[in-house]
Image (tube, rainbow, N blue to C red):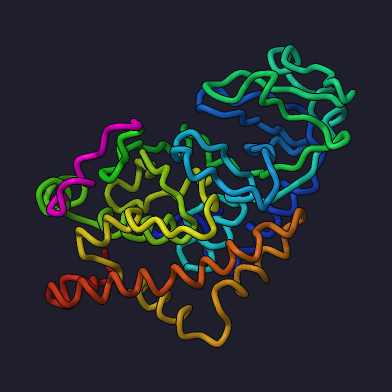
Amino acid sequence: MDINERELYPENSQPLKRLLRDMAMLDIVHVAQKEGGTQLKLIINYENEGKALFKPMRFSRDKETDPNHFYFTDYERHNAEIAAFHLDRILGFRRTPPVIGRILNITSEIYAIADEDLIKTFFISPANNLCFHGKCGYYCDTAHAICGNPDTVEGSFAAFLPSKSIAPRKVYRHPYRRSYHKRRRATWENDPDYCDKYVRHAPPYNHGRRLADLMDMAVLDFLIGNMDRHHYETFKTLGNHSFIIHLDHGRGFGKAHHDEISILAPIIQCCMIRNSTLQRLIDLHNGQTPLSELMNKSLNMDPVSPILTIDHLLALDRRLPIILNVVRECTRKRPFQDVIISDGY
């Protein structure tokens, strides 16, 4: 991977194509549960010493998020990880680690090569299927187990970033983090001047590319409907010139018929967007091929296609002009040059 200050990989990257193929095809030699986190994830070790992060399929593509459930209680969706990677490329960001779908045989590709702690959570269900649940903060019990169908499980495989000894990373609390409390709202949700008071003039947002990168992330999150953005990572060696790595999109694509405008709060309050991002959005909006069709064509290359339902694809076309309208409103309130900023940032 040719990582630089702007992206994880260049456009039309040949190593990327090989990496995706390897994650989908190479033999797996060991499986272990990833420590930490609220939901089950597995670390996949390949025969070539490569690694991937596996998120299992929890429910069907057309299962929508219960409108009475908070975003932080929802399952993570493996297909959302796959779709976000493709959309990130289409938008021209290329800041999401590569993700591809794959179907595993639970017996031979998980149980037979799993570490002891994971094996202890396997059991035979009343339907005589092999199941496992691992150990985690939520949904890691018999009632929320991953079971064979009949003996296979589908999931997303995300490429590991370079080890932290090679490419150390720094974690930041997202300034537009939600409260993660059912009765409490975050400061930014109550104060329309939050950006000018607490973000724009504070490090690391008062210089370099960081603030503009927050706007790019808001664009991606709004299009996929992801409200679960509490922290983010950058490459430490690149300092404030590092792009924000787009990670963890498992809570996207949960509501095809609801557009969560609050996800655009960074753009609405800061009234800022990078010129190249705006031009890409305009091109996608005015182009002969709708974003939904571009996404569908890209997603059809994945081994577990179809990835998204038609309703989720069409939601992309509906949400795109909403972003453009937010930017248009900003240019009515502030000088154009303050809203549409140079790609040098």
Is 106 left or right of 302, judged from the image as shown?
Answer: right
- Quadrant in which residue 128 is drawn: top right
Q: Residue at x 20, y 51 (%)?
A: 205
Residue pictured at 59% horizontal, 25% vertical: 139
In the picture shown, does residue 82 fall above or below 126?
below
Q: Is 331 displayed left or right of 260 in the figure? A: left
Q: Is residue 193 magenta?
A: yes
* Closest to the observer, 78 or 113: 78
Residue 242, given in percent of the width and then of the height, sits at 34, 51
Kindly indicate the quadrant of the structure image that contains residue 85.
bottom right
**Against 318, is 177 above or below?**
above
Q: Position of residue 76 (x, y in %)?
A: 57, 39
Quarter of the figure with the C terminus? bottom left
Q: Residue at x 40, y 60 (%)?
A: 6
Residue 235: horizontal and vertical position, in percent? 39, 44
Report the magenta residues as a range. 181-194
Q: Main secondary structure of the magenta part?
A: loop
Magenta stretch: residue 131 in it? no
Q: Residue at x 79, y 43 (%)?
A: 103
Front-lying residue, 163 or 316: 316
Count of all numbered marks drawn on residues in the image? 0
> Residue 119: x and y, percent?
76, 16
- Seen as rendered, the residue at the extreme front is 68
